[in-house]
Image: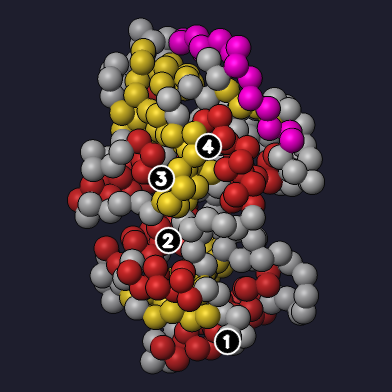
Amino acid sequence: MKAWQVTGTSKVDFSALQLQESQNVPEVGDHDVLVKFQGASLNYRDLIIAKGMYPFPQRDNVVPASDGAGIVEAVGKSVTRFKQGDKVITLFNQGHIAGTIDEVALNGGVGGVVDGALRQYGAYDEQGLVHMPSNLNFVEAATLTCAGLTAWNALYGLKQLMPGDWVLTQGTGGVSIFAVQFAKAAGAKVIATTSSKDKADRLKQLGADHIINYKDDANWGETAKKLTGGRGVQHVVEVGGPNTMAQSLKAISFDGVITIIGFIAGGKGGAQPSFVDVLTNVCTVRGVLVGSRHMFEDMNRAVEANNIKPIIDDKVWKLDQAKDAYQYMWDQKHFAKVCIQID
């Protein structure tokens, strides 16, 4: 069995990723499900785990990648949720079944503490998997675990998105693209930021109502609020971090929700927003760590009902090419999800 492992860390490159070709197929316990992986996808989290920059728990020599989809090869004698031949997807935090996450579930992150999907076979407790939406192939389905569920949580986890609401997304990463798709399926209006004309054109094709080039418009938060008629947006999917939060606060409506899911823009340069800015805007700022299994199942029903097709990068990699896929994503050459096909 082939399996990648994070054998250390390197901030210079991805040399910590090593392909092992003599791994044993995992044994199946009474409550376990053996999955033959067919597809995986990468997240920014996977990149920074390999570089030793991840702020949450991770285990030495872990198999990376939280996001995987495949076919059930075998089940333990006590398994009731799945049978051989079922198509399944991994749950990001294996112990996060419903409600809010706790410390126990936090220590069950796939690809960080629990072995992930960059391998040919993986065994998981039956509670840590969900059925795959019937309208997707394996590579498409493998994008849902982290990016899809995080976007769903941002729009439905605290204050439910309603038809006619405004949503502000940032960039063209996986979470932001899913947020555009989910928002449009719900009858909401979307303002998307980007720095590229080509990416702006693709966002329009996905249904974004307005595009703002944040390099041309440094006060894009104010511009977004004007586009709503001065009311502001009800949801901001905040992926940039401290350097974009100031503009997000300018865009948000009273009683709106800013969901922080990333920090790709860093935290240096200029004065940063404070809790006073949150108070004066009368809004909620929340951080999320993906979502629960029950939330995942809700999302999958919506994916099927609306025939939502995850957007993946034009280049799909093979398992042996995973290290190159990491570098490709780190160099920001991708659009939406970077995916890996597993044979």
Element under label 3?
Answer: helix
Q: Are marks 1 and 4 in contact (CB under 8 Å)?
A: no
Q: Earlier in the sequence, mark 1 or mark 4?
A: 4
Element under label 2?
Answer: helix
Q: Amino acid at mark 2?
A: Ile
Q: Going 57% across and 80% down the picture, which residue do you hit? A: 214
The residue wearing badge 1 is 217
Element under label 4?
Answer: loop
Q: Main secondary structure of the magenta part?
A: loop
Answer with the quarter of the image where residue 84 lies: top left
Task: Answer whether residue 26 is magenta in the image.
Answer: yes
Report the magenta residues as a range.
Answer: 15-29
Task: Answer whether residue 74 is magenta in the image.
Answer: no
Front tag of 3 and 1:
1
Front-most of residues 35 and 40: 40
The residue wearing badge 2 is 177
Q: Quadrant of the C terminus?
A: top left
Q: Earlier in the sequence, mark 3 or mark 1?
A: 3
The residue wearing badge 3 is 144
Q: Is residue 200 above or below residue 175?
A: below
Q: Is residue 84 left or right of residue 327?
A: left
Near mark 4 (Cα within 10 A), the count class, few <14, some 14-19 or many ≥20, is many
Near mark 3 (Cα within 10 A), the count class, few <14, some 14-19 or many ≥20, is many
Instruction: State how far apart marks 3 and 4 are (Cα).
Output: 10 Å
